[in-house]
Structures are given as structure tokens and as C-alpha cells.
Image (spheres, grey):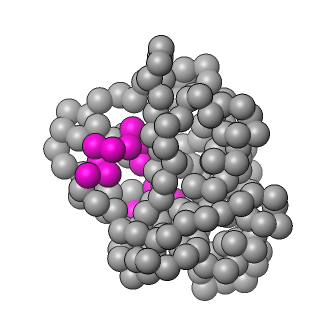
Amino acid sequence: MTREPSNSGDNKISVAFCCLGNICRSPMAEAVLRHATSEMKLSHLITEIDSFGTSGFHAGDGPDRRTVQTCRANGVPVNHVSRQVRLSDFERFDYIFAMDRENLEDLKYMQPRGSKSKIMLFGAYCEDPKMDKIISDPYYGGPDGFQSSFRQLDHFSRTFLKKLAVGTA
């Protein structure tokens, strides 16, 4: 049975993001949440923020240059080395946010029975009815796709943090 993450009392939570290769969306999500957490002065609520991919295609690589460019253009530092999800991640992280349905299903399939992670789409924290809840893979597109992903991730991060701060995440 999956335990509900809690931020009551002194309990801090750990958060991870997952996409396919861990070079575009998930390292961007990691950087954006880390930045928003600092900006909103909510670092006391989160112990760890990380990201990984369901595949090991790019393990050991840095983020895609367009991810880095987009983050920097928006004033968000990004520093990450790609890795594949490990079984231990399902005990290590309270929340594992998938970028799309395929990665969500892969994570649910891999999750060991009884592990603590709450696995869900990060888009569950979308409060803008005009915004897509699925963060599409921008890898084969141009800069606009990366900027669109950034806007979504910034919105979802800030919504998640607001709900976390009031205990409704």
C-alpha cells in the first residue's frame, strides 16, 4: 500500500521528475521547482529535488542544450547529469511526477509493491484551463516547444508549492 506523503510537522518531502531520457523535460522540471522553491521561500518543505528517465539512453549526459538555453533565458540555473530510474527511487522519493501518460504508466509498472512514492502526472497541478496537463516532449522540435514546457513546469511547480505550503498537495 502506498503511503500518503505528508508535510505536517517537521516532515519534509522529496520530489523527483521523470521523462523518457532525462535530458529535456525532467531536468528542466527539477531546475524550475528548485528555483520556485527558493523564490517562494519554501525550501523548508522539501529535502530533495531530482530527476531521472525511464530509459537509460542518455545516462551520464548533461541536459539538452535547448533545455539549458531555455532555463537560462528565464533566469533559472540548471545543473544535472542524466540517469535512469532505480528501484530505490520508489522508496527515496515521496512524489515522482511523470511528464506524460506513457512515463506515468511505465513508472507505475516498475513501482515495487508497498513502496512509498506517490506517482502522478505533474500536470495534476494545472490550474489554467487553457494549459495542457501533458508536457509534450520538445526534443524533436524547436525552441518554442522548450519554452512551452518551461511555462507549464513553472505553473505546475508554483501550484504544487502553494498546495504543499497549506498542506493540500
Residue extent of the magenta highlight: 88-103
Residue at 72%, 31% in the rendered image? 41
Q: Quadrant of residue 37?
A: top right
Is residue 70 covered in magenta?
Answer: no
Which residue is farthest top?
A: 9
Foreground pick, 44 / 105: 44
Picture mark count? 0
**Does 98 appear above or below 161?**
below
Residue at 63%, 56% in the rendered image? 31
Residue at 46%, 33% in the rendered image? 13
Q: Residue 78: x, y in percent?
A: 66, 63
**Does 126 appear above or below 133?**
above
Q: Residue 21: x, y in percent?
A: 45, 74
Instruction: Name the quadrant of the N terminus.
Output: top left
Residue at 67%, 80% in the rendered image? 65
Foreground pick, 88 / 96: 88
Is residue 96 covered in magenta?
Answer: yes
Q: Is residue 117 left or right of residue 100?
A: left
Q: Is residue 162 left or right of residue 118?
A: right
